Structures are given as C-alpha cells and as structure tokens.
Image (tube, helix red, strand yellow):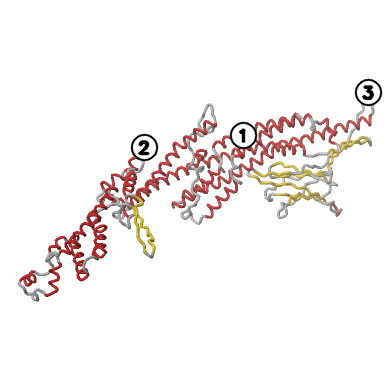
C-alpha cells in the first residue's frame, strides 16, 4: 500500500503541475487550430506588399495592451538572466508589466495620439479652407463677400421682385433697368455713375433744341434715365429703398460674422409645405461660426501644448506638429498656405499627417519586432525545457522496463537453482553427511506459441522466441497495411532459441504495426501458422514512442538427474512496469507533448510573421501582419516568460519525482514480486 500511495502522490503533483501550463492556453477551443489558421492566412497572402488589411483591428488584450507585457522584451528576465539573490515571480511579473507600460505602451500611445491629432489637424484645416463649396469657412475679402453674397442677392430680389411691382407699369421696366444700371455703377464702378453714356456733342445738340441732331429718342431716353444725365423722383425713391435694404442685410451679416469671429456659420435649408401647392424654404444655423473658430484654434495649438507638457523623451512631438502654430503665422500664404503645395512638395498638413503616421507605424513595428524576437527566444527555450522533461520521463520508462526484464532473469535463475536442489534431494534423499553429489541438467525453454518484443531504443524493437527445432528457419517481418521493413532471419541456437538484431521502425507510419513471425521446418517439413504481435507506434514532438505487447512467452524451467525431473512454467509479462508507466508517466508525457507541439507550431508562425514584417513595405501589409500577431497574443496561445520559468522549474520537479518514483519502485519490487525467492507465485 505504501508503494501505491507514493506513486499516486507523485502522479498528482506532475499532472497538476503540467496542467497549470496548459490551463493558460484554454482561452480558445484549440490553440493548435488557431496557430494553424493564422499560418494559413499568412501563407495564402498573394504578396507581402499587397496583403489586405483585416477589419478586426487591434485587441485591447493584444500586443498593444497590458497583456503584451507578458511577451515583450522589457525588464529583467528573471532566473537565467542576471543573477538575483531572491526571486519572486509575482513581483517580477508586476514590475515587468509596469516597465512595459512605461517604456513601450506609453510611448506608443503618444505616437498614436500625435498621428490621430495630426490627421484631425489635416481634416480641420482642409475643411476650414475648402468646406463651403470649395471656399474657406472664414471671410478672406469682406467687401467682396458683402457684395457678392449680400448686396447682389438683395438687389436682384428687390429689382425684379415685389418691391418694384408698385411702380406704374408704363415705365416700370425702364425704372428696373435704370435701378440695375445704377446698382452696377454703385457697386462695380462708382465712377461710371457720373458718366452720362452719350457724347458731349449730343448733349450740346439737345441743349440747343436740336432734337434729331442730338440722336433723337434714343439719346433722349439715355439722358433722361441715366443718373449722369438726368434724375427722376421714381428712381431716387427706388434707389433709397434699395440702399436701405442692402445696408440692413449687410448689418445682419456683419453681426453674424462678429458672433463667429470672422467665420461663417453652417446652415441647412429645409422646404416647408404651406398647403395649396405653396412651399417656402427656411434656413437655419446648425453650427455657429464661433464654434468653428474655437475648434480650429484648439486644433492648431495642440502641437504646442504637447511640447509644453512633455517631460519624457518619447513625449516630444515631431517638429512639424510642434511648429504648426508658427507655420501658419509666418507663411506668406498664412493659414491657407498650410494646405498648399510648393515646388512639387506635399503641403504642410499632408507632410504632418504622413510624418506622424510614419512615426506611429515605426513605433508599432518596433514594439512588435521586439516582442517577436523575445517570444521566439521564449518558445525555443520552452520547447527545450519541455524536451528535457520528456527525456527524463522516457528514460524513466526505459529504466522500469529494463528493471522488470532484470527481475525476470533473476527470478528464472532462482527457480532454476531451487528446482535443481529439489531434484538432488529426491535422488539423494536425506544424507546426514551431505556427501551425495550428482550432476543435474537444467534447461530454460520459451513457449513456441508467442514471442517477446522489447524496445532497446525509441524507434527499434528486438524480437525473441523459440523454434520447434534447432534447424528451423525463422522469418520476422514488421509491416503496416501499406508499408513494411525488410524481413529479418535470425540465427536459431542449438536449444532452439533465437533473437533478432534491432529492427528500426522509424520509416513506418504511425499506428498499429504487425510483427509477423513464421517458422519453417527444415527439409520441406512444412510451415507453422505465423505468430502475430502488434506494436503501436506514435510520433510525438519529443520523439517516437513504441508500445509493445505486455504478454511474453512463458518460460519453462526443467531440472533432470537420474531420470528424476522437476519443472515449472513461469508466466512472464511486462504488466508491472506497464502499469506504472500508464498511470504515472504516460499521462504527463502526453501533456508535455501537447505543449511542445504548440510551441513548435508557434515558432513556425512567429518565424513567418517576423519574415513577412521585414519584407512588407505597404501600410496595409504591415497592419495585416501585426493584426495576426495581435490575435495570437490576445488569445494567449504563445508561451510567456512566466510560463518558461514554470517549465524550467517543473523540469527539475519531474527529475526529482522520477528519481523518487524509480527508487520507491525498485524498493517495492525487490521486497515484493521481484524477490527471487518468491518465484513460485509466478507459476502457471
């Protein structure tokens, strides 16, 4: 009972310890599937410069979040790096998180912030310069603006509208023409309103009473209605009303511009149904001009404020960002010059957006490249640590199998000695002087209906058995449904025993391998039915595992002297070692193989990401590759520095546990079933 309790205790420690590594990767249905899927997406991209950007974006739990601290190459690396007298994993990981945030994430966030702000600046400046039907949101020429946007529309509505409908119809048209001419002279050419429009000679002719010599009715009409020649009360009254309307409209618009600090308001027009087929348009303000001005002021001052508040190296913004406020003041084109290109060079705001975006991408790829390099190292070290643990478990397995084989050798030897003594006692009887000495012949023979298969190495087997006669021919073949290795013909000894050399099964596929043993009698005596044994082959990331049958040929021991015979057949098997292997070693080895398989797949994916990131120059291509890395980190399918430390520590724990398991097993076997004196309990 003490043996079983001890081994089960060791098993529970190993399985729970190993599961602690695996639990971290249970965030997705299958880590291997996710890694394979990401690798397929990377391999299926037609070109590293034309990879489409994924729509998912970056995760809060990805490489650019706090989760990335577990994978980033910042802070101390713990044991294995620089020496630390006392190491606390929790304190180390917390410090690592803080260092990652301070050294990488904060700087990356600031570069992103600058890129976002620069893009906002570019959009705001562009809109402020062209947002009103291609015109600036601010007034660049107030008199011209008042003329074209206020005076002209008001004058047009006044002249042709209801305002002049009250003028007598016989000369209404003439008054409207005169008003339009007078308005044009007033606004487009003030000197022209003093010009009569007819020659001086014509005027003198009219003054001298020569009506026809002065041009007749055509000249008379011109002189009568042209302010430079004549004036009428109708014209004067209409002109006064026009002037008042224009001044009123200009005053209203001036007030609105004052409210907006020189910026126009954003208005919308809505048509209202008045009924009876009549409609009217109503315009309303949706964004006051002062809000546009304030937003632009805040935007242009962003670079200066960021520079003022910077107290760390990575907080310093780019020269273009910090100088944007000075640029539009000093540029000969002023604010509008921010959007203009000169001598083939991109505009200031375009260069600002490009530079900020380039800085952000550079920081992103820098953080990612550092993380990839560190994670590659961690995965390589992790795989090595787990491989070392797997080697320890495999060595323990072979040691148990070897000890069990040694036990049967010792048991057989003791059985042979005891049977020989029994024959001697029967022949000699009780001899007080103990002078009876007779030769006793002993033999050990294997049953001919079975073979013994052992594994001297990870990928080879040795087959042993006994032929019916010493002259028989034995043929051994290992095969699957589709493949086989060359047949082996071992030498049969004089007592009929035979054994093959090591047969390498590495070239055969995984699965069940059938070992066929055929005995053919000499001189055409015929062939016995073949003996079939089955070996299971499994190729794991840590090596090949061969599982051979537990059953072995029974051993018959015979002692003979003077026609007196004593014999015993021992039921030899490998069940003792197999039970311990299946319960205490194989479950842990299976979990380790899963971890190593995931680590090897992760190394393949990371190498692909690293290679693509180095070769990709397009923005969309870089984003696609980085999103794949971000997806892996957010899903936690990659091993971390902390998990590497666990794996290294568990390798030592497994070594100690296997040593304890082997020591206890050997002690328990030697005191129990393996004790040679107890050979009789194995008799059939």
Q: Quadrant of residue 267?
A: bottom left
Residue plotted at (89% across, 34% down): 440
Q: Earlier in the sequence, mark 3 or mark 1?
A: 3
Give the CA distance from mark 2 to mark 1. 46 Å
Q: Nearer the viewer, residue 301 or 295?
A: 295
| Image location (x, y in percent) of residue 523 | 85, 53
- Residue drawn at x 60%, y 47% is 32
- The residues tagged by marks 3 and 1 sit, at their Cα atoms, a distance apart of 63 Å
How busy is the neighbourhood of tag 2: few (under 14 within 10 Å), some, or many (20 plus)? few
Q: Residue at x 21, y 59 (%)?
A: 241
At a point 68% along the width and 39% down the height, the residue shown is 587
For residue 198, above or below residue 584: below
x then y, percent, for residue 7:
71, 32
Looking at the image, the residue that sits furthest to the top is 433
Left or right relative to 596: residue 443: right
| Coordinates of residue 125 in the picture (x, y in percent) | 33, 50
Q: For residue 211, which quarter of the picture?
A: bottom left
**179 relative position to 277: left or right:** left
Q: Specify the label residue 310 is tagged with.
A: 2
Q: Does 80 appear above or below 51?
A: above
Q: Could you tell me if the residues under marks 3 and 1 are in contact, i.e. CB atoms within 8 Å?
A: no
Report which residue position mark 3 lands on.
432
Sequence-first tag of 2 and 3: 2
Q: Which residue is mark 1?
A: 650
Q: Nearer the viewer, mark 2 or mark 3?
A: 2
Q: Where 213 sits versus 253, above or below? A: below
Q: Nearer the viewer, residue 49 or 667?
A: 49
């Amino acid at each position: 009972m003490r043996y079983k309790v001890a081994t089960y205790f060791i098993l529970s420690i190993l399985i729970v310890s190993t599961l602690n590594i695996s639990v971290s990767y249970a965030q997705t249905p299958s880590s291997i599937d996710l890694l394979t899927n990401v690798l397929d997406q990377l391999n299926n991209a037609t070109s590293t410069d034309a990879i489409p950007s994924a729509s998912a974006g970056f995760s809060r739990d990805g490489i650019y979040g706090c989760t990335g601290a577990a994978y980033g190459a910042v802070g101390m690396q713990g044991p294995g790096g620089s020496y630390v007298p006392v190491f606390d994993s929790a304190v180390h990981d917390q410090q690592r998180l803080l260092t990652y945030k301070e050294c990488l994430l904060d700087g990356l966030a600031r570069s992103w912030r600058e890129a976002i702000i620069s893009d906002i600046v570019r959009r705001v400046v562009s809109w402020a310069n062209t947002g009103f039907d291609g015109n600036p949101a601010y007034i660049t020429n107030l008199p011209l603006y008042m003329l074209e946007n206020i005076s002209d529309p008001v004058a047009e509505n006044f002249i042709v509208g209801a305002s002049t409908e009250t003028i007598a119809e016989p000369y209404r048209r003439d008054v409207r023409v005169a008003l339009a001419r007078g308005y044009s002279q007033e606004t487009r050419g003030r000197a022209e309103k003093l010009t009569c429009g007819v020659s001086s000679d014509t005027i003198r002719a009219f003054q001298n009473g020569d009506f026809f010599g002065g041009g007749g009715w055509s000249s008379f009409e011109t002189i009568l209605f042209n302010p430079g020649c004549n004036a009428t009360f109708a014209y004067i009254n209409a002109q006064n009303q026009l002037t008042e309307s224009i001044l009123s409209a200009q005053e209203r618009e001036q007030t609105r511009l004052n409210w907006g600090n020189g910026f126009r308001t954003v208005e919308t027009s809505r048509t209202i149904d008045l009924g009876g087929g009549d409609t009217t348009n109503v315009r309303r303000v949706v964004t006051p001009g002062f809000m546009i001005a304030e937003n632009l002021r805040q935007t242009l001052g962003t670079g200066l404020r960021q520079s003022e508040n910077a107290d760390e190296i990575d907080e310093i913004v780019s020269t273009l960002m910090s100088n944007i406020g000075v640029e539009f003041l000093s540029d000969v084109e002023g604010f509008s010059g921010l959007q203009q290109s000169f001598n083939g060079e991109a505009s200031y705001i375009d260069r600002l957006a490009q530079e900020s975006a380039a800085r952000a991408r550079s920081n992103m790829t820098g953080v990612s490249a550092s993380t990839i390099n560190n994670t590659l190292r961690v995965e390589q070290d992790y795989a090595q640590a787990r491989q070392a643990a797997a080697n320890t478990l495999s060595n323990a397995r072979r040691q148990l199998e070897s000890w069990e084989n040694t036990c049967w050798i010792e048991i057989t030897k003791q059985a042979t000695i005891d049977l020989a003594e029994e024959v001697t006692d029967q022949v000699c009887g009780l001899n007080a002087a103990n002078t009876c000495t007779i030769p006793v012949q002993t033999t050990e023979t294997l049953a001919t209906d079975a073979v013994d298969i052992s594994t001297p190495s990870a990928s080879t087997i040795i087959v042993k058995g006994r032929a019916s006669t010493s002259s028989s021919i034995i043929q051994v073949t290992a095969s699957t449904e589709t493949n086989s290795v060359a047949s082996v013909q071992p030498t049969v000894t004089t007592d009929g025993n035979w054994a093959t050399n090591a047969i390498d099964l590495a070239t055969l596929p995984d699965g069940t391998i059938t070992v066929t043993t055929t005995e053919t009698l000499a001189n055409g005596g015929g062939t016995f039915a073949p003996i079939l044994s089955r070996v299971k082959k499994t190729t794991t990331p840590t090596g090949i595992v061969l599982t051979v049958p537990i059953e072995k040929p029974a051993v018959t021991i015979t002692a003979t002297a003077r026609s007196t015979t004593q014999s015993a057949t021992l039921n030899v098997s490998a069940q003792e070692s197999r039970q311990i292997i299946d319960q205490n070693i194989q479950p842990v080895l299976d979990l380790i193989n899963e971890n190593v398989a995931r680590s090897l797949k992760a190394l393949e994916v990371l190498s692909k990401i690293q290679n693509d990131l180095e070769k990709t120059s397009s923005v969309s291509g870089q984003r696609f590759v980085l999103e794949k890395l971000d997806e892996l980190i957010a899903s936690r399918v990659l091993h971390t520095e902390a998990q590497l430390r666990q794996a290294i520590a568990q390798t030592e724990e497994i070594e100690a546990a296997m040593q304890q398991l082997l020591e206890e097993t050997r002690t328990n076997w030697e005191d129990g079933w393996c004790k040679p004196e107890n050979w009789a309990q194995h008799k059939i």
